Amino acid sequence: MSTTAIFVQQTATQLGPILRELPRWAGVAVLLLVFRPLLVGLLRAAILIVRPRTTRDEQRRRAHMRDIQLMDRMIASSSGPSHAAELRAMAARD
């Protein structure tokens, strides 16, 4: 028997189990592609159950507190009293 035939026979023997599983994996891939919108929706619903969205009022309060903390840090790191007064004036505009 030639070396090419032996190589082909050994390769076919090694690839046999992989080729038998290939249709199964292709079927799983097709199902995932077909039902992707449903699966994404279920995942989003599960995420909302674990971590619900905050209301707009809570978001606004958080943003306001973040702004206040930013101004406080800017005032603390300012180089002089005039900068601090100017930053306080900017903060009071809201």
Image: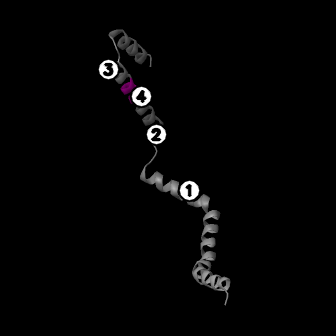
Residue at 63 percent across and 72 percent down: it is 27
Between residue 17 and residue 91, name the one nearer to us: 17
Q: Which mark is residue 76?
A: 3
Magenta span: predominant SS is: helix
Q: Marks 3 and 4: in contact by CB < 8 Å?
A: no
Give the residue pinned by disc 2. Answer: 55
Query: What's the residue type where badge 2 is placed?
Result: Thr
Q: Give the range drawn in magenta.
A: 64-70
Q: Name the residue under label 1.
A: 41
As shown in the figure, which amino acid type bears the numbered disc 1?
Answer: Gly
Q: Residue at x 36, y 27 (%)?
A: 69
Crowd around label 2: few <14 · some 14–19 · many ≥20 (10 Å): few
In reply to whether residue 85 is colored magenta, the answer given is no
Contact between marks 1 and 2 (CB within 8 A): the answer is: no
For mark 2, give the secondary structure: loop
Secondary element under disc 4, as helix, strand or loop, is helix
First of labels 1, 4 by sequence position = 1
Q: What residue type is labelled 3?
A: Ala
- Mark 4 highlights which residue? 64
